[in-house]
Structure formats: structure tokens, C-alpha cells
Image: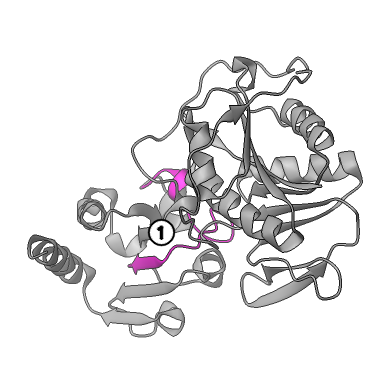
Amino acid sequence: MAVLVYAETQSNKIKKAALECVYYGKKVAEAEGTTCVALVLGSAENAGSLGEYGADRVIHISDASLDNFDSMVHTSVIGQVVDAISANTIIVAHSSTGRSLLGRLSAKFSAGSVSGVIDIPDYTNGFSVKKSVFSGKAIADFLVKTEKRLLSLSGNSFKPEKIGTTIDIEGLEVSIPSSSIKVLEVKRQEGIVPLPEAELVVSAGRGMKGPENWGIIEELAIELGATTACSRPVADIGWRPHHEHVGQTGVAIKPNLYIAVGISGAIQHLAGVNNSKVIVVINKDSEAPFFKAADYGILGDLFEVVPRLTAAVKKFKAEL
């Protein structure tokens, strides 16, 4: 038996989410007294570096036909690897890719699955894992009774640490079915950490008064090394692109620091960000609901507060 981790890639590079999954997979493998096997599909650089984060083996099926994600094709290939190494626990990231694989693999193996897990399994009474429920307001334990089990790991639940060394890559002969999807073009936001993987996020809402004022948010994000985000109304009226929308109907995030600027804090927005480790709210409305969820609140005009905060960050960095 083994623990199999599907390591996602993007632009031929191993994603941060993959490092988290491999590190988590190693912890699960240690608890089960078995090995952690990382699987990389398609073109990828430095796949052997996954050994640094706990992989005992790295299988790389580098066929270029796997570069563009097709859930049916990838499910077939991953399923063949599961059989080849006798994996009983399969781990994927809780991303759009991982979630689409989770259901298909669960059906393929008639296996129990849990999405968005946040902790190492508890083996006291079988195989039990924790996940956030009710929009992050509670944590539930899920007992998986099937021989095989599938988990998707919630982003930023575990900080990956280098606990090993780079290892040799293995190949594996598999049958790759033809894809029914033809990719004509791929457009991807480059140069920033994707929101689900971001540890620092600066977000803003309608309090910005217009898209022309967004420069102060971007400047603060640049100084902090953060990813920018926005509330749903801002995305809906076209001030910011929809991939920046965080909340219940947008991207759910779990950063170490979430700075909310000019956002009232409607329940739908809070549902997507309340798992942030630290929340800082900047708003001139003392009755804004977000203040009740904040770890730190600044009551003031954002057009005065944000530039001063950016200046303070610059000064701090200059003194390091």
C-alpha cells in the first residue's frame, strides 16, 4: 500500500499547492507506515525536487498530451498509477483541477472522498479527517470506511517544509486515452501568486469609488508581496477582473493575512475569507459588519490610511 499525491503543475512548473500536498502526503504515509509517491503528469521542470518535501518516489509521465488538463484523461492515467503502486490513499489539491478529479476517481474506485481537509487523519476509530463546514463556522469529522480513500487538501492548511532531498524521477508505462477536448488557446494571469495559494492578500470593495483609484491598493500589495482581490460588486460592475473576486460565490481563500479595504463585510464575502489567519479591516463606517470578524480594525478614510500604511511598509523594509 502507498499514499499517492497528484502534484499539479502550471507553465511547466510545480505549483505551491503541490508542495503542500506532498508534505501532507508524507505525514499521512508516516502515520500509515508506508511510502509517499508523488505523481507528475505532462511537461514539468524539477519534478525530482518533490523529494525535498517528503516524496519517497516521484513518478513523472511526461507525455505532452497531458499538458492540457482533461479530467477524463487524467482520471484514467491516475487510476492506472493507483493500481500499479497499490495506493490506498490518494491526495489532490483542493483546486478546480483537484475537485474535478476527486469525484471521478471516487466513482472509479467506489471510494469515499472528503474535499477540503485541513488536518492529518485520525486513526483512533478508523480513518477520520477534519474539514471546515457551514462557510468556515464549524469543523466536522468525516469517517471514511472504504478501503481506498480520496482527499483534497485545503490550500494553506500546511506550510510545506523541506524534510528530504531531491530524488531520481521514475517513469511508468500507461495507456493514455485520446482527449475529446481541443484546446485552442490558454490565457492565464502570470506573475502573481494565484489567490487560492496566496499567503498575503490585499482586497478592496466599492469604498474605492472607482477603478481609477486602484493604484493605492496595487502599490500596497506590491510592497507586501501580496495578491490583490476584490468583493463581488466590484467584479460585477467591471472595476476588477472576476478572477480576483473572493467570497462565497467567488474564490474561497485562506491566507495568513487578509487586508480588506473599503469592504462592508457582507456574510457572502465573509464566507470566503473567514478562514484567514489574520484579518485587517480598513473602513470609515464604524457600523461595517467586517469589524466584528476582524483581528485588527482601522476606522478611517481609506484614501488617507492606505498610503500611510504603504509608506510605513516601505520604511520598515528600508530599515531591515
Q: Nearer the viewer, residue 166 or 276?
A: 166
Q: Is residue 313 above or below residue 190?
A: below
The quadrant the C terminus occupies is bottom left
Residue 43 in magenta? Answer: no
Under circle 1, the secondary element is: loop
Is 240 placed left or right of 211 in the picture? Answer: right
Q: Position of residue 118 (x, y in %)?
A: 63, 65
- The way the protein has been coloured in the rendering is one colour
Please state the horizontal and vertical placement of residue 208, each as a whole percent of the image: 28, 60
**Mark 1 burial class by Cα count in 10 Å: few <14, some 14-19, many 20+:** many
Residue 246 counted in the magenta span:
yes
Does residue 48 appear left or right of residue 151 in this picture? left
The quarter holding residue 137 reads: bottom right
How many marks overall? 1
Compared to residue 4, the image places residue 306 above or below, namely: below
Instruction: Kindly identify the residue that appears in the image at 73 percent across and 40 percent down.
Output: 101
Residue at x 30% of width, y 75% of height:
283
Q: Would residue 171 appear left or right of 201 to someone viewing this image?
A: right
Please, is residue 291 above or below residue 58 in the view? below
Residue 205 in picture, x, y percent from top left: 37, 61
**Which portion, as a residue range, is magenta?**
240-262
> Who's the residue at 37% across and 34% down the image?
190
Quarter residue 202 falls in: bottom left
Task: Report the magenta stretch's main SS.
Answer: loop
The residue nearer to you, when weighing 313 against 300, is: 313
Which is more toward the observer, 304 or 197? 197
* Residue at horizontal 40 percent and vertical 45 percent from the top: 238
Residue position for label 1 = 199
254 sits left or right of 84 in the view: left
- What amino acid is found at the position of numbered circle 1 in the picture? Glu
